[in-house]
Every structure is written in C-alpha cells, then in structure tokens.
Amino acid sequence: MWAASSSASRSWRRAATAAVCGRERVACFASAAATDGASKAKVTAVSRVRGTRDLLADDAAQHQQVLHVLQQTVGCYGFRPIQTPLLEYTDLFSRSLGDGSDIVMKEMYTFKDNSSKSVTLRPEGTAGIIRALLSNNLMFSLPQKVTYAGSMFRYERPQRGRYREFQQFGVEFVGSSGPSVDVEVIAMAADALQALGIRHKAMLELNTLGDAESRGRYRVALEEFFSQYKHELSPDSINRLERGSVLRILDSKSEVDQKFVAEAPRLDAYLSNDAAQRFDAVLSGLDALGIKYRHNSRLVRGLDYYSHTVFEFVENLSANVDDEHDGEPGSGGIAVLAGGCYDNLSETLGGPPVSCIGWAAGVDRLHLLRDIAVEPPTTIAVVPVLVGDDQDAVLHESMQVAHTLRQRGLSVHFCHGRGNLKKQMKAAEKFGCTYAVILGGDEVKNKYVKVKNLEKRQEETVSLNELRGFEFAPQAAN
C-alpha cells in the first residue's frame, strides 16, 4: 500500500513539475515571440538607390538580345571584346575628361578607398579602354579594334531611358585614322542600328571639330563672342566660359542660351584647309555608301578629347530619315548612339600619340526604340509522379530525362515532386513552361513518358529513345 502510494506521489510530482516547466516554456516562447514581433516591426524594406533599376527576366532578356546583336554586327568588322574594371583611379577621368568638365565636376561617383586613394565608378568607357591598352603594352601593336559593354555611373537626373547606373556598349578603333576610317566606323554604327530594326528611327548628324589649330582659332572667336553676353547666359554657361570650356556652351540645352548659340560664330569659317578637305572626304564616303545624314554645325559632343569627325544618331521624332538639311540643328530627339575621333587621349594618359575613333550607345535607349519582342524560350517541365513504392526509381529516371534534354540545349524546369500531379502541372504553367514530360511508375517500367503541350492541351506517349530526338515546337510570341 505504501509502495503504491509512494509511486503515485512520485507520478504526481513529475506531472506537477512538467506542468510548471511547460508553463515556463510557454511563457518563454510567448516572450520570445513578442520580442521577435517587436523586432520585426522596426525593420523597414531596403529600397533601390535612386536612378538604378532591377532588370527582371523579360527586360534582362531584351538587354541580352540587344547586346548579342551589337556584338555580332561589330564582330563582322573585326572588333573583339575586352573588359575593364568598373572602378578606376579618379586621376584617369580628371585627366581624360578635364578637371573643368561637367562630368568630373558634377556627375562622378568618387570616394576614398581604405588606403585614402581617390577612386571613381567609371562614368564612360573610352578612357578605361585606352588605359587598359597602355597598361598591357598594346599601344605598340596597332591597330587595335576592341568593343566593350557594361555599367557606367553618372549622377544625373533620372528620366526615361536615362539612369544613374546605365548599360553602355561601345567600340574603339585605336591606331588608325583618316576619312575612310571615319566612314567605316559610322557605317558600322548604321549597320548595328539596322540589325536592331531601328535604323529608320534615327537620323545621323555629324560635324567636324577640325584639327588643334582650327579649334584653337575657333575657341578664341567663341570666347570673344560669348564674353559680350556673359551676364545674360545661364549659370552653367557662365561657369563654362570662366573655366575655358567654351565649346560646351554650344551644347547647352538651356533656353536662356539658345538665342546666343544661334548667333555664335560657326566652326566652318575657322577650319584649316586640311581639316575641311578631310571632312569633305567623309561626307563623300557616306554619300557613296548611301548613308543619309545631316551636317549639324553646332554638334560638338560632350567630352573634351574629341577632334575632327564627331557624330550622333539622334532619335528622329518625325520618323523620316530622308529629310536632309545641311547645317540644321537636330530633330529634337535624344542621341541613341554617338562618337567621334580623338587624337590626344593616349598622350594625355602618358602614352604615345595615337589616333582613334569610337562610338558608344546606351542599351536602355536602344531597347526602348525596338518594336521587336523577344521570343520567350520553350521551357519544358519534367514532372515525376511520386506515389507508391517505386518513388526512388521514378525520381532517378526523371532526373536522367531532364539531364538528357538539357544536353540538347533545351531549357528544363524540374518539378521536385511537391504536391500531386494536378498541383505540379499548375506550378509548371505558372513558371512559364510550354511542355510537360510526365513520368510515373508505369512509365518507368515500360520505358516511355507522356509529353503534354500545355498551350494546346494535347498529350502523346513517347518512348525514352524517341524523346532524345523529339521536336518541341517553340513557344508563340505574345
């Protein structure tokens, strides 16, 4: 009797202790949950930096296609890709673009690294390309025909097609010069726009900045002219005048400056005979190739290292590229591709004198001008039906089928057996699959699969051997 009572007492004590500990654990969990809830309430979502954007699947595919078309086109001209760092020493850009340029003064992302050296996220691609060729002793093996693509960074006001981080594609023909070189590089740009299906939407505008002698005389004439109206110019143009960047005033978008720009001297009157003859030869070459253009005598480009031929393909708001006007300003659209000659950049960066020409295009702007939709890939779902005792065999065979299809270069989404067949098929359609290859126990035993066209709702039985050569029709573009 005592033993039974003692045993009951011990059982009661254990139960009471467990109840107390249980209440403590519940209280502890409740306290932790409350703390966690309070902590979560303080967390705010992390947003993108202003002027940047996320390229999701469809947009990323569009960008990749634009880059692919551009690379294919310039590859036909013998240009090969190279890559340079996003991060360069600030001195590279202050020397190449000029300390007084708008980009260096206002738009660069510059900071000190942990060793107190000033570094900058590249605002443009050309200076980095020339620096790379110099650093790797390639300036002594000319000519070099290179292409590049990647992110550039400028602190500008974000707007449609213009971001603070933007994707750029460019080419540089280094170590060769002359009218025929200019014509070939411009023709390559026209071919690239044609390959993208947007040549009819952009008018070629070009000008000559002449040689150093011509530009020197022209700068003096401009300084004398704009100095008369110094206090009537926009603040930016006053600043340009004071720091010696008078050519930049011609590129001003300010309405305040436009009446003075319209009356300013023209470079044509200050060109040397050699510079004028070179530009005439460029125009003759373009005529011979049937490339339509406008001679825009106000076009100067935004970077200080340009000389001789400069050009832009400007979005043509009237969509009429046959409308040619000599000496008229642009059509009012934005430049989608632009470039020109530069002869002194290599020397400025400590290298030998080398003549170059290049152009660059913003991938975002090219994308916006295109009407061509990227055809979505045909994605095949491999769906294992995991029921019964043969789940391992079905799973392994399904994975082998997926591997075989991928070796054919097909896009395959493997459904990892979550949910019943109906749920897996819905998940496959939601993922964007156009076909489903279904395997269950019977299919594995008899060495066949069911292939279902998810768009047409048609299903057929295909042997594993036949599946190796089965033709999956491409998905229809929307």
Image (cartoon, grey):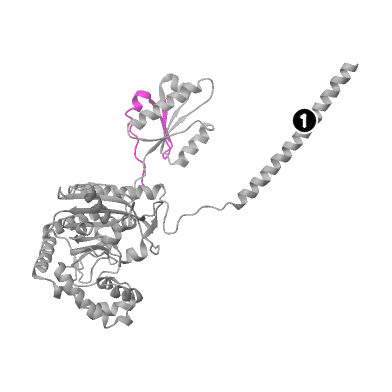
In x, y percent, where is residue 229? 29, 82
Query: What kind of residue is marked 1?
Result: Ala
Task: Locate residue 178 relative to residue 420 in the image: left or right.
Answer: left
Secondary structure state at the residue bearing disc 1: helix
Q: Residue at x 39, y 53 (%)?
A: 113
Which one is in front, 162 or 156?
156
Identity of the residue drawn at 35% across and 76% down: 235
Q: Residue at x 43, y 41 (%)?
A: 432
Q: Is residue 453 magenta?
A: yes
Q: Point out residue 441 in the picture as x, y percentages from the top left corner.
A: 48, 22
Taking the view exactly as shown, the residue that stands out farthest to the right is 1
Name which quarter of the figure residue 262 lies in.
Answer: bottom left
Q: Which residues are magenta?
A: 449-478
At horizontal 50% and vertical 23% (from top left) the residue drawn is: 391
Residue 196 can be seen in this image? no
In front of the other: 118 or 442 = 118
Can residue 193 be seen at all in this image of the molecule?
Answer: yes
Question: Is residue 408 positioned above or below 317 on the image?
Answer: above
Please state if 58 lies on the left or on the right of 278 as rendered. Answer: right
Does residue 323 belong to the magenta stretch?
no
Position in image of residue 82 (x %, y %): 26, 47
Q: Quick one: which residue is furthest to the bottom in this view?
A: 228
On screen, residue 198 above or below 443:
below
Q: From the image, tell me which residue sits under label 1.
A: 18
Q: Give percent across and percent down for residue 326.
A: 17, 71
Quadrant containing the N terminus in the rendered view? top right
